Amino acid sequence: MLLHRREQTLVVLLLLTSCGVASTLSPLAALAGGVLLMVLAIIKARLVVLDYFGFRSAAGPWRSILLAWVVAVAATSLVPMTVSFFR
């Protein structure tokens, strides 16, 4: 039995969440400093926007605008960590 697109996305979201949790438990989390978690969050947000908000069939500019917004929010959340790193 084949899974529908939303079910496939749900499986991928659960796997990415598991990877995020596993990465916080390893010593790599201290080295990565949250960047890995932000990359996983961006990927997950993109999947949610495309498959659950229904933007997969939308025109290209709308998808690009929403992805740019997600990346901007994630990058903004990394600013405090970056500032404290360079102090």
Image (cartoon, helix red, strand yellow):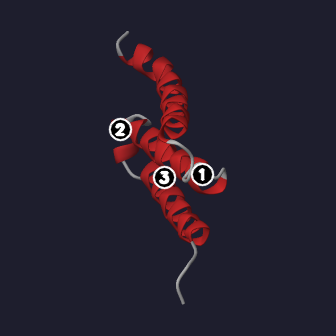
Q: Mark 2 highlights which residue? A: 32
The quarter of the displayed image where residue 5 is located: bottom right
Q: Secondary structure at mark 1?
A: helix
Q: Which mark is residue 20?
A: 3
Of the two numbered discs 3 and 1 on the same chain, state the one appearing first in sequence.
3
Q: Secondary structure at mark 3?
A: helix
Which is in the foreground here, disc 2 or disc 1? 1
For the point 59% across and 47% down, which residue is it?
49
Q: Mark 2 packing: few (<14 Cα in 10 Å), some, or many (20+)?
A: few
Answer whether labels 3 and 2 touch (C-beta < 8 Å). no
Q: Mark 3 packing: few (<14 Cα in 10 Å), some, or many (20+)?
A: some
Give above or below for 31 relative to 72: below
For the point 43% across and 15% down, which residue is it?
84
Assign the C terminus to one quadrant of the image: top left
Q: Mark 1 highlights which residue? A: 48
Which one is nearer the viewer's eye here, 78 or 62? Answer: 62
Question: What kind of residue is marked 1?
Answer: Val
Residue 73, given in percent of the width and then of the height, sits at 55, 28
Residue 47, given in percent of the width and then of the height, sits at 53, 53
Give above or below for 27 relative to 80: below
